[in-house]
Amino acid sequence: MSIEVRDHVSIAVKLENFGVAAPSGFAILPHNLATATSKGDLRQHVESDTVRTLLLGNNIPHAEIFDEDDQPAYLQQYGFEWYGPTLFISAGILLQNPDVLSVTLGLITNYLYDLFKGSKNGSASLSVVFQDADGTCKEVRYNGPPEGLSAVTDIVKELGAK
């Protein structure tokens, strides 16, 4: 299992450069937002739709950054690894609903348990971008067994407490 925390470009500034309104709470971001040079360069993992379905099916409010007809292209990767989306959470939403990230990661973990049923070799990767009240962003990147995803919640909460 590996967890890496690093600085991330401002989500608001980057999306503004592409003519897209920044989310104010909880959302799914394109995978390569930090490095994309144009809106057409943006890519999202195929599993972004799976996570959207989990959020909708469990009444977890989240912002849609792109219209249904304006979604970034999908990035399909093959192997016995689940490539999750990049989740965005702001300090404000973490204060309003401190359990939203842990509940979401729990839903994803349960989904992955069913997906990898019967195998101990399944692996998951996922990123969470946390935006502090001052607009600075940190990215928490996770790669490892699905049951380790809960550690991401603790790290993001620590970032919010600073």
Image (spheres, rainbow, N blue to C red):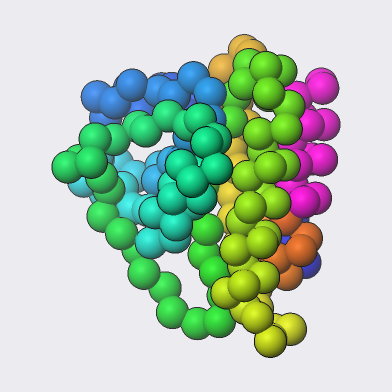
Instruction: Give the magenta range.
Output: 150-162
Q: Magenta span has 159?
A: yes
The residue positioned 40% from the left and 23% from the top of the image is 22
Residue 158, x across and y down, in percent = 82, 31
Side (left or right) of 147 relative to 135: right
Prevailing secondary structure of the magenta residues: helix
Residue 5 visible (yes or no): no
Side (left or right) of 47 relative to 161: left
* The C terminus sits in image quarter: top right
Q: Magenta span has 28?
A: no
Q: Is residue 36 above or below residue 48?
A: above
Residue ranking furthest to the bottom: 118
Q: How many marks?
A: 0
Residue ranking furthest to the top: 134
Residue 113, x across and y down, in percent = 67, 70
- The one of 118 and 13 positioned closer to us in this rendering: 118
- The one of 43 and 27 positioned closer to us in this rendering: 27
Residue 10, x across and y down, in percent = 50, 26
Residue 76 visible (yes or no): yes
Residue ranking furthest to the left: 69
- The one of 136 and 114 positioned closer to us in this rendering: 114
To which quarter of the image does residue 145 belong?
Answer: bottom right
Side (left or right) of 75 relative to 123: left
* The N terminus sits in image quarter: bottom right
